[in-house]
Amino acid sequence: MKFYRLPRVLYLFIIATLFLGCTNDDNQPDMVSEVQMPNYTVIGENFQSVFQFNYDGTLDEGELFNLTAESNVNREYLTLRQVSDLLTFFSFAAGSFSAIQRNYVSGESTFLNEFYTISSERSVTWGANSENKLFLGFFSPEGSTNYGIRTINLTTDEVIDLIVEFNVNDVFEPLYYGNRLLITFLDQQSNYKLSILDTDSNTIIRTFDFGKSVPSILINKDGDMIILNGNSASDYELTLYDLQTLEVIQQERFSINRYFSAGPIQSEASIVNEKLYYLNLYAQPSIIPFGPAIYDFITKENIIIDMLSVVQQVQEEIGLDIELTAFDYNDKSNTFLMGYAKLVDEETLKGGIIIISEEGRLIRNTNLEFAPTRFIKN
C-alpha cells in the first residue's frame, strides 16, 4: 500500500453502497470436535474505530480492544506493518508522517509524532520499520525517479539516505525480517528487481534481476526467504533462500492458475509441510472475490475450497449479505480464517470471522462489532 493510497479505508466505504439488510446474531454453528480451534489476532474497523480482537481457541474466548480509544489509532491510518509482536500504524497529517507502535501482546504503545515532514527534495512512497528503526522509500531529487531509502534510527535519531537504483519505473511494497529489508521494484528497462538491504550496516548486499518474470516473496516459519518467480502463464519457479547468507536451499517448478503480484505476498499465501496455502481469486463477475486453496507440491494436486457455498451458509445464518475482507491460514489448527464485513444499516458496519477446515467444511462463524482487515501472524 503506497502512502498516497487508501484502498483499505475506501474499501470499507464501498461496502456501504453494496448491501443493506437486517441482522441476527444468534448464529454460531456447533464446534466440530475433531478440529482444533485456532488462536488468532485480527485487526479491523467499523465506521467509528480501529479494533484488535484476540481469540483463544482452547478456551473459546475472545478479547476486544478499541485501538482508537486506547492508543489513538486513527481510522485514516495509511498502512500497518508487523515485526514480531510490534504493530506500527503509519499515518499522515498536516504535511508530516507519524506512527503509532503497539505491542499487540502487552498493549504497550509508543507515539512517533511527525518523524518526517514532506519537502520538495523527495517524494515518500512507503514506510516500513524494524524494532528500533524506521525506513522510508522515496524518489529523489525533485522531478527524478531515483529510488532511495531513508533510515531513521529511533534510538540515536541518526538519519541515513541510500540510493537503491537510478531511474526506476515502479516500486512495490517492502518487507522487513531479521535485519533484512526486501525492496522490490521495476527498473528503467521494465525488469523486475529485488534488492536486499542489510539494515545493520545500511548496505545493499545483493540485487536480484528477474527480467520480465514477476518475483513474489514469502518468509517461512524458519525465517528463510521464498521467491515465487512467475509469469502470466502461471508457471512458477520456487526458490528457497537462507535469508542471511542468500544461499539457495531448494528449487522447484510448479504451475497453478493464479497470478501473484510483485513483492511480499504474506497476506495471500504461506507454505507449510510441502503445501502452498493461498488465496484463490474468482473470475469476475462473481458474488465473492476470493477464497482458500491448497496446492500440494508432492501430489501436484490443486484443491479449490468451495467458498461460495460457505458464504451462502453464513448469509443464511445471519440474515445479511457479507463481503469478504481478509484471509489467513492457521498452520497450528490446519484451518483457514476468512474475515468479512456486514452492513447492518447505513451507519452500522459489523463483521465476523469464518473458520474453515482444509476439507472446506464450515466450522465456526464468530460475529464481531467491526470488519476485519488483517490477521496478525503469531
Image (cartoon, rainbow, N blue to C red):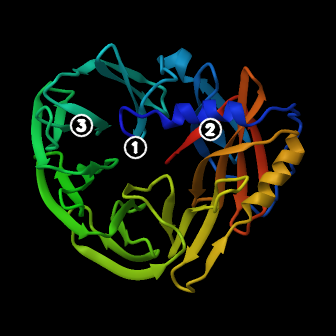
Local SS, label 1: loop
Of tags 3 and 1, the one toward the viewer is 3
Residue drawn at x 67%, y 35% as measured from the top left: 15
Q: Is residue 86 visible?
A: no
Q: Is residue 19 above or below residue 218?
A: above
Q: Amino acid at mark 2?
A: Pro
Label drawn at residue 372: 2
Q: Is 329 placed left or right of 361 in the picture?
A: left
Mark 1 lies on residue = 84
| Percent position of residue 36, x then y | 71, 58
Nearer to the camera, 14 or 221: 14
Q: Earlier in the sequence, mark 2 or mark 3?
A: 3
- Dots 3 and 1: beta carbons under 8 Å? no
Q: Amino acid at mark 1?
A: Ser
Local SS, label 2: strand
Compute the Cα span from label 2 to label 3: 27 Å
| Percent position of residue 100, x then y | 39, 24
Label drawn at residue 313: none
| Percent position of residue 231, x then y | 39, 72
Q: Quadrant of residue 263?
A: bottom left
Q: Earlier in the sequence, mark 3 or mark 1?
A: 1
Residue drawn at x 28%, y 18% as measured from the top left: 96
Q: Is residue 76 above or below residue 220?
A: above
Residue drawn at x 73%, y 69% as measured from the top left: 359
Label drawn at residue 135: 3
Compute the Cα span from label 1 to label 2: 20 Å
